[in-house]
Image (cartoon, grey):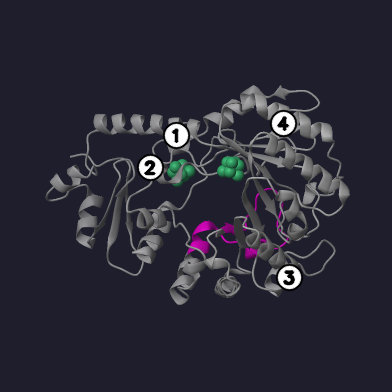
Amino acid sequence: MRFSAYNILTPLADSDEYLLMNILTANADILSKQEAEDVRKGRVPDPAPYREKGYVLDEGEESRLYKKAYLDFLDARDEGEIQIFFVPWYGCNFGCAYCYQQEYSGKELSLDPAVIDAFYTYIDGEFSGRKKYLTLFGGEPLLPGNTAKDRIRRLLQGAARRNLGVAVVTNGYHLEEYLPECKDIEIREIQVTLDGVGDVHDKRRPLLGGGSTFGKVVRGIDAALGAGYPVNLRIVLDRGNLADLPGMALFAKERGWTRDPNFKTQLGRNYELHTCQKNSGILYDRVEMYRDLYELIKQHPEVLDFHRPAFSVSRFLFENGELPGPLFDSCPGCKTEWAFDYTGRIYSCTATVGKEGESLGTFFPEVSKKREAIEEWEERDVTTIPGCRTCNLQLACGGGCGAVSKNREGTIRAPDCRPVRELLEMGIPLYS
Ligand code: SF4
Ligand code: SF4
């Protein structure tokens, strides 16, 4: 009797029961303590039900299933959409306490219209025949002033001519003034960050040089939803604002946002990416953040009306009645995500864009590519990261983030482990 190398066994929080899950064979079951003990020892009294569900299977069969799932994963990814980020400048009108781009943001606002034209010429050729959409990113893309507006308009018109959908990642401060520019554009999503209600937000996300931003960001969200645009509200969490989530949930409800089908939410974790945080004591690691979230949601279940955290595959399982397919790769960089900036440089993604030494080539003034580096990004997945190859969590984890791996280990071919077991431990009881 051989147990699958991809079985995940974990105790469930606030219970005596255990979860046994296998993403490759698409099964999840709740076990008693005794059954879990038997599985852990590799000796169950009756293997038949375990064999039926693929928790027990021979090596050849497992390897066949794995290869097929991998090829299906690659096919689906090749047919999927590419998200193309464009950074028109790194300048920003906010002085967020945790901004990882602070060290780049003193640069001039000097996007040459010729760079915009070269950008479109490049993506027309490079990604021809692929489904794709554009995401405006920064710094802050929606800055005041005629020059900024003119450049953003040129970018939007270029997208409209190509029938490209557009997403915008903005701090929301000038969103209302920019909405007329979005007419006749297929706006996929406007992502706006609000870190709490009133002062909680203002302390974390003030204007550069100081000053409240909350009221104007809220008016921007109201206006965007009122005009029928999809808004994705992002909250960047750390120990400084997690306790404000119930307040945020109530605020969004009272404002009518949570009733709007165009409104969705996203939780981000404040973490150290490239530069030192001024106050790194307030940062959570992933497990700590989800533990505090789990406890908070037990006290305030209404938070789930505002946001339903994924807790690895837990939410997916309960919302869809089945497990998601195997995740061979959780890092879209150079596969379904690319980033370009106003200097004419090409990067893997939003985590590397603008960072010294991370450019993978140029699209302006001439096209050049660092082929070896690009191939390394393209090939990064759980089959090529040595530390992931024998990990039983790999098909739920996907190997994590290449940029984080490189910052930590000096190479993107290193694991950035997701705490899959701990997240399932909390998520399964939360949603069942
Ligand atoms: S390197 Fe990290 S941030 Fe960049 S695409 Fe991969 S997972 Fe995302
Ligand atoms: S990153 Fe860590 S947890 Fe994820 S598959 Fe690799 S070794 Fe496993």
Earlier residue among tags 1 and 4: 1
State the residue position of label 2: 325
Residue 386, labelled with which disc? Answer: none
Mark 1 and mark 4 residues within 8 Å of each other at the beta carbon: no
Q: Nearer the viewer, mark 2 or mark 4?
A: 4
Say which amino acid is labelled 3: Gly
Say which amino acid is labelled 1: Ala
**Image quarter for ligand 2:** top left
From mark 3 to mark 2, how far is it between C-alphas?
42 Å
From mark 4 to mark 3, how far is it between C-alphas?
36 Å
From mark 2 to mark 4, how far is it between C-alphas?
34 Å
Q: Nearer the viewer, mark 2 or mark 1?
A: 1
Instruction: Measuring from the top left, give residue 208's x and y in whole percent.
Output: 82, 61
Residue 120, labelled with which disc? Answer: 4
**SS of the residue at dot 1?**
helix
Q: Which residues are magenta?
A: 266-290
State the residue position of label 1: 76
From mark 2 to mark 1, how far is it between C-alphas?
11 Å
At x 69% / y 74%, what residue is drawn?
A: 198
Residue 215, labelled with which disc? Answer: 3
Say which amino acid is labelled 4: Tyr
Q: Residue reaching furthest front?
A: 184
